Image (cartoon, rainbow, N blue to C red):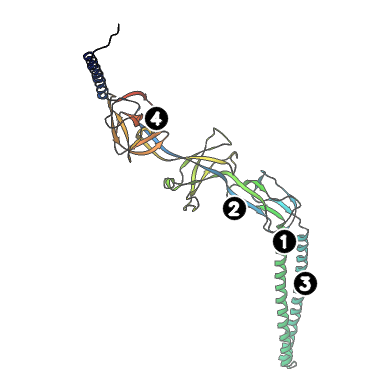
Amino acid sequence: MDFRPSNKQRWLLGLLGLAAVGFLAMRVGKGGLQEQSKERIAGVEVATVQRRTLELERTLSGALEAESRVVVAAKVGGRIERIAVDLADPVRRGQAVVYLDDAEFGQAVKQAEAELAVATANLAQARNALELSRRENRRIETLRERGIASDSESDIAEANRMEREAQVAVAEAQINRATAALESARIRFEYTRVTADWSEGDAERMVAERYVEEGNTVSANEPLLLIVQLDPIVAVISVTERDYGLLEPGMEARFATDAFPGEVFVGRIDRIAPVFRESSRQARVELTLANSDGRLKPGMFVRATITLDRVEDAVAIPEAALTKRGEVEGVFLVAEDGARVSWMPVESGIRSRGWVELRGGSISGRVVTLGQHLIDEGSAVRVVATHELEATP
């Protein structure tokens, strides 16, 4: 049997379809409005505002240098016969460390002694001649007074006396010259025995470098050895303009070095350069460390941690709580019921080990540390984690 709907039935079926579509659309529309009417709640992590002692610290790298360096050099040239010390040997002030061949200088001393002997003999001869001249002059004066000797004979005797006095003066000058030459020869002879000399600091130091070997021929003023003082030892670091104004002589610093992992050495700022290097825009700072056991050596790399500022009982929050809205820095405070947050601009101070000082006011309660990108002023929140940290670092 063939059933075909009539035109009236087709019209009724279409009308029922349109009604069904409209009903479904209405139900869907009501559901969307209901969803839009629900407020979004953001999950956040929070931490409690605390009172803490905060310290502004900087860790700067540098290297160790000797407190004092003395370069031992030969004052005369010659061949090295013996070196009395070696690398890392202790050396006392005034100790002979290098000996040069002294044969030529010893011969110069003997020659100068002989020349002094000749000059001494010449002086004795001149003085004897002067004495004879004086006697002759007195004899002529006596005869002239008696009318036996003439005035010309007296003049000749006086001229002879004056000549002998001049000869004595020349002989005395030759003595002085020969004496000076002998002293110079002896000094140069002593220079073949090279000593380590310094005026300040410890009486004993250490050989840091040896530049020559026995048998080498060296010239005057050529470096032979480097002598250094290791206690105390100096750490040299460089600081930028940001930290320069916070440094003062006497500030304490803690040092670490890879040579002794886990150990901390303590030193103090001794000198701060009054100028900045143009190439790096940094200033040189020297710190002094005790080194009685001599373990710290010049050239070692060190890291110096210096406390630049300290605030007692500071209002502090975790550094993660700071956020920005535009150019303004602030935090999100959580309401007491934990349901909403409010935005509060703040002025941050020093930062220390993950904490930030808040200045210019006092806040309390809890601040959002994670999830700030999901919220704004007055946003509804749900606290998913609270980080309760100790009140002191």
Residue picked out by circle 2: 199
Q: CA distance from mark 3 to mark 1?
A: 22 Å
Dividing the picture into quadrants, the one containing residue 13 is top left
Which secondary structure, mark 3? helix
Instruction: Tell me how far mark 4 sits from mark 3, CA to CA.
Output: 93 Å
Q: Earlier in the sequence, mark 2 or mark 4?
A: 2
Q: Quadrant of the C terminus?
A: top left
Foreground disc of the pair 4, 3: 4
Specify the amino acid type for callout 1: Arg
Query: In this rendering, does residue 50 appear at all?
Result: no
Residue placed most toward the observer, 251 or 41: 41
Q: Nearer the viewer, mark 1 or mark 4?
A: 4
Asked if disc 3 and disc 1 are in contact, CB closer than 8 Å, the reply is no
Q: Residues within 10 Å of mark 4 (few under 14, many from 20)?
A: few
Near mark 2 (Cα within 10 A), the count class, few <14, some 14-19 or many ≥20, is few
Q: Tag 3: Cα neighbours inside 10 Å, few (<14), some, or many (≥20)?
A: some
Regarding mark 2 in the picture, which secondary structure is present there? loop
User: What type is the residue that disc 4 sits on?
Assistant: Thr
Q: Is residue 268 above or below residue 332?
A: below
Q: Residue at x 42, y 47 (%)?
A: 245
Name the amino acid type tagged 2. Ser
Q: Which residue is mark 4?
A: 392
Q: Looking at the picture, how far across and down is residue 307, in whole percent?
A: 44, 40
Residue type marked 3 = Ala
Residue 86 placement, left or right of 282: right
Q: Is residue 292 left or right of residue 340?
A: right
Residue 274, position as x, y percentages in the image: 46, 53
Give the residue pinned by disc 1. 186
Q: Which mark is residue 121?
A: 3
